[in-house]
Amino acid sequence: MRYFSDFHNNGHVSIDGYGSELLGIEDAKDEATMALIEIMPYALRSGDKSELAISVRDECGKPVLKVVVVFEVIVPH
């Protein structure tokens, strides 16, 4: 089945127009998780707070899962 992984970075979305042929939802979850791990060092350089996510939809456009990472630096007063 083809799955599409849309990247979310602090409210901005990049739509996956190509997708990937995967065996199932577990493979889609693994691919989305690994993609976020690879992207995090670059995306987190932009400030003290970031929310990154990859939402995965199937070939019919139905959302099947979302992997989210929230990074925040908190300095107590």
Image: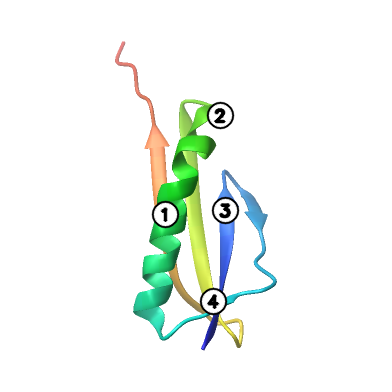
Q: Secondary structure at mark 4?
A: strand
Q: Earlier in the sequence, mark 2 or mark 4?
A: 2
Q: Is residue 13 above or below residue 31?
A: above
Percent position (x, y) of residue 50? 48, 37
Q: CA distance from mark 2 to mark 4?
A: 27 Å
Q: Which residue is mark 2?
A: 46
Q: Earlier in the sequence, mark 2 or mark 3?
A: 3
Q: Amino acid at mark 4?
A: Arg
Numbered label attached to residue 68: 1
Mark 3: few, some, or many residues within 10 Å (few <14, many ≥20)?
Answer: some
Q: Which residue is mark 3?
A: 8
Q: Earlier in the sequence, mark 3 or mark 1?
A: 3
Q: Amino acid at mark 1?
A: Val
Q: Secondary structure at mark 2?
A: helix
Task: Answer with left or right where residue 22 lies relative to residue 61.
Answer: left
Q: Is residue 47 above or below residue 7?
A: above
Q: Secondary structure at mark 1?
A: strand
Q: Is residue 50 above or below residue 63?
A: above
Q: CA distance from mark 4 to mark 3?
A: 14 Å
Q: CA distance from mark 2 to mark 1?
A: 17 Å
Task: Answer with left or right where residue 41 lies relative to residue 58.
Answer: left
Q: Is residue 43 above or below residue 29?
A: above
| Residue drawn 51% across the image and 71% down it | 56
Q: Which residue is mark 4?
A: 57
Q: Amino acid at mark 2?
A: Ser
